[in-house]
Image (cartoon, rainbow, N blue to C red):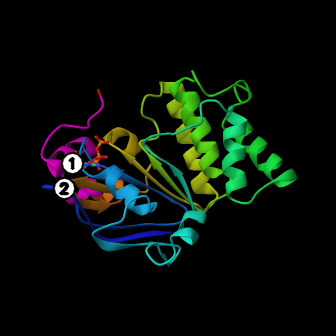
Amino acid sequence: MIEVIDLCKRFGAVKAVDGVGFTARDGEITGLLGPNGAGKTTTLRMLYTLMTPERGQVRVDGIDAARDPLAVRRRLGVLPDARGLYKRLTARENIDYFGRLHGLDGAALDERREALIATLEMGEFAARRTEGFSQGQRVKTAIARALVHDPRNVILDEPTNGLDVMATRALRRFMRELKDEGRCVLFSSHIMQEVAALCDRIVVIAHGRVVADESPDALRAQTGEANLEDAFVRLIGSAEGLAA
Ligand SMILES: Nc1ncnc2c1ncn2[C@@H]1O[C@H](COP(=O)(O)OP(=O)(O)OP(=O)(O)O)[C@@H](O)[C@H]1O
């Protein structure tokens, strides 16, 4: 479980995150939805301890990220916005490198790596250096690397960015599997349809603030709109973020 309480972060005059709070529960997919520049990536960066909040608190499985960032990192699997693969290493080597950083080796690492390669259908390219990988191949490798230590909580920053329809569908299936395993899955997106298709809970963020935090059905009911698309437009005050 990930709990975020009153997070704030400024960059000069820009209030990127201005009092964001929400809870992402185990066995659920929570979507952080907002238009470009809303503050999603900045929120997630504070969550996975890459950036220090000016104010507020992050708790992962009850552990305060400011007090024990290492314990929090062990409980998190993160797909960051910059996928950040080592291009001279193969996909397998990228996964192994992270596995070793988490203290895995030998048969345990082999088993976990190969299970992820099978689930994410990476067999065809797992032995290739990641330099020159397509977007989909890069995302899959980065996700496998993020999950090698079997974390209970999974954070994905715009995971389907740049993926084609087939790759997007495969990734959505994979996220549902993570949820069915009882994990807490939190992902960001600026595409309303994507969030509506996947999420148990939608946290809508605009101008650094949470403007709604509901189930898709409750969001429709709350805004009095027949469909989510209209509800989203009303909440953020523009049609930005609606997929074509
Ligand atoms: N390192 C930084 N330095 C200065 N400004 C920043 C920095 N990071 C983010 N910002 C600003 O903070 C605001 C929120 O940015 P953020 O990247 O969190 O938005 P986002 O919701 O993830 O957007 P997108 O969907 O475009 O990725 C924007 O106005 C952005 O320009």
User: Residue reaching furthest right?
Assistant: 107
Q: Are marks 2 and 1 in contact (CB under 8 Å)?
A: yes
Visible residue check, residue 132: yes
Badge 1 element: helix
Task: Identify the residue under disc 2.
Answer: 223
SS state under label 2? helix
Q: Is residue 121 visible?
A: no
Bin the neighbour count of mark 2 within 10 Å (Cα to Cα): few under 14, some 14-19, many 20 and up. Answer: some
Residue 232 among magenta residues: yes
Q: CA distance from mark 2 to mark 1?
A: 6 Å
**Badge 2 amino acid:** Thr
Q: Which residues are magenta?
A: 219-243
| Viewer-side residue, 228 vs 238 | 238
114 relative position to 184: left or right: right
Residue 116 horizontal/vertical position (percent) = 71, 43
| 81 part of magenta stretch | no
Q: Which residue is mark 1?
A: 231
Q: Residues within 10 Å of mark 1 (few under 14, many from 20)?
A: many
List x then y, in percent, for residue 63.
51, 77
